[in-house]
Amino acid sequence: MTSVDVRDISRFIDKLSPYFVDTPADCPYGLDCLAVYHQAGFSFLPPVVLDEFLAAGYRRNGNTIYAMRCPDCTACVPIRLAMETFRPSRNMRRIRLRNQDIEISLGPLEVTPEKLQLLDRFLNSRYPGRASTALDYYSGFFVNSLAPSMEISFRVSGKLVGVSIVDLAERSLSAVYFYFDPAFEKRSLGTFNILYLAEFASREDCDYLYLGYWIEPVAAMTYKARFRPHYLLINGEWVQVD
C-alpha cells in the first residue's frame, strides 16, 4: 500500500470519528493491562467501506467496528496477507496434503445444535472457565447485519471438525473466527483454514486476507506470523515481513 492510500484512508476514518467512543475493559487476551476499544456501532457498511476500515486496522465484533487504543500496550498488531505475494511454506503444503480428505462447504451464518456443541467443546478446551457460551459467541460476535458474512464448514467422513467465520469486503476477506474439534488438533486445522481462505481469496480476485491481530506475547496468536510474506500495520503503514 502506498503512502497516498494510507492518507486517503486516514481522512475517511477521520470523517467518521464523531461516531466512535473509547470503551475501557479487561484485556481480552489476558495481558496485565487496561484494554480500550475505539468503537462504533453501524447497522450496515457497504463492502467497499468495510475494506477501508480493514485497511486502517479495524476489526468487527457483531455490529461494532473497533480498533484497540490501549494506553499502556501496543501488542495487538493488525496482520494481513497479500494474495499477490503470499506463498505457502513446504510444511504448510504438507498440512494441506494431510487434510485433502476434508469435505468443505460454504454457506450463510446459521446457528445449529451441531455447531454450538462443537464451539462449546472448543471453548472449554482452549479457555476453561470462560463465562461466554457458544450461543453468546454467535449472537453477540459472529451474527451481524453490518457486513456480508459466511461460514465455511470442514467435515471428515461427515463429522463436523471445524467452522470458519469470514466477512466479505469489496476487495478482501476478513477472517473473523475459527473453531475446531480439539480431538483433531494434530491435523493443524487452524493452518489448513488459513490456507483454504487464501486459496478462496485468490479465486475471488481479492487483494488481501485479513487475519486479525498478531500478538507476540500471546502464544495462541503467534502462529499467524508463520504465513509469509505477511504485512503488519505499524505506525499507520503496512510493512512487509519476509
Image (spheres, rainbow, N blue to C red):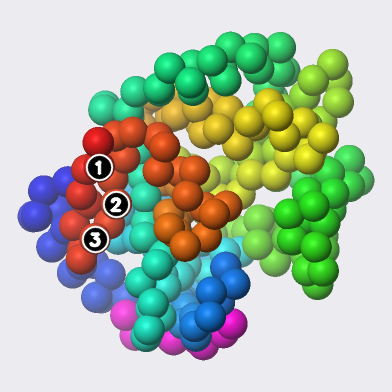
Identify the residue at image location x=50%, y=85%: 34
Task: Estimate the x, y position of residue 215 in percent, counting from the top left.
Answer: 45, 59
Seen in the picture, residue 132 relative to 200 is either above or below; the reply is below
Camera sees residue 200: no
* Disc 2: which residue: 232
**Label 1 is placed on what type of residue?**
Val
Which quadrant of the rendered structure holds the C terminus? top left
How far separated are the C-alphas under marks 3 and 2? Answer: 6 Å
**Label 2 is placed on what type of residue?**
Leu
Q: From the viewer's perspective, tell me whether residue 42 is left or right of residue 237.
A: right
**Label 3 is placed on what type of residue?**
Ile
Seen in the picture, residue 27 relative to 215 is either above or below; the reply is below
Q: Are marks 2 and 1 in contact (CB under 8 Å)?
A: yes
Q: Earlier in the sequence, mark 2 or mark 1?
A: 2
Q: Which residues are magenta?
A: 17-26
Q: Are marks 3 and 2 in contact (CB under 8 Å)?
A: yes
* Disc 1: which residue: 241
